[in-house]
Image: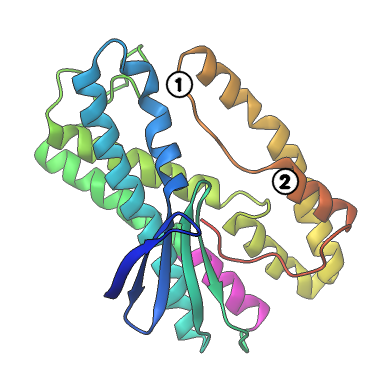
Amino acid sequence: MQRFGWDRKNAALVFTMKGNIPVHVSWTFAIPAALPFLHEWSRRPQAALTHTLIFAALLLLSVFLHELAHVWAARRQGIGTQRIELYLFGGIAWFKPGPASPYGWAWIAFAGPLVNIILAAGFTTAYYLFAGPLLPVHHGGLFSSPPPTPATPLEWTLWLGILVNGVLAILNLLPAFPLDGGAIARHLLAPRFGADTAVRIVGFCGVVLSILRFAVIVPAAAAGILVWIPPSFRPNWRAFRAAGNKKPVPPHPA
């Protein structure tokens, strides 16, 4: 990697990977990394700092590897990558126009969640080998006390590695825009139902899921845990109504 620096205009850390692929890491990427442990700072500031740093490092690694998997799969299809962005809502890889079939694009979209599944399995194996069997989470909550206390930094890292990658894999496979699952569903449905109908089907699923997500967000907020869970309502509502921007929805956000 080379050409490492800070982009003042976009407030992002910028570097270039092998293959001349620029990577932009926005300062907003730090927001989801810090949110889960805000409630701990008033009670256990030292533990909150440790948990936040571990979570931030794991989130950065997991999302970045997710995007690299998209890039690798696209390269296998003969498609180049314009850039990779990591920002508030995760990550996205922008591709150059290419000759991939709908099934090829579906594979490109699936490659990211697949890497998170593999990482979650690896962290789970490491946890069993070095920390013992996984136990139920303490009643204090998923983020407030995994694994059951007392826990060493290694146990915390492995536990959160399982959690982060498991959540990334599950969320990204949801059939909604702009998630990978939405792109997978759209490309698999298009040959059978047509592109417009495929977009509307995924948009409808996304609208339903964007409403149901509050069943998680509201109880988490009441417990003092601030989280943001996709999918968003607007892009799915627009897709369902087939209104607005007609540009294709990217098949590769994280």
Q: Is residue 117 left or right of residue 207?
A: left
Residue 41: x %, y % from top left = 31, 18
Q: Is residue 181 left or right of residue 114?
A: right
Q: Which residue is mark 2?
A: 206
| SS state under label 1 | loop
User: Of discs 2 and 1, which sits in the foreground?
Assistant: 1
The region drawn magenta spans: 101-111
Local secondary structure at mark 2 = helix
Residue that numbered label 1 is attached to: 225
Residue 148 visible within the image:
no
Residue 152: assigned label? none
Q: Quadrant of residue 38?
A: top left
Taking depth in this image into account, of 2 and 104 the one nearest to the observer is 2
Q: Identify the residue at image location x=88%, y=58%.
A: 242
Q: Earlier in the sequence, mark 2 or mark 1?
A: 2
Q: Position of residue 235 (x, y in %)?
A: 74, 50
* Residue 96 inside the magenta-drawn segment: no
Judge by depth and name the residue closer to the eye, 253 or 208.
Answer: 253
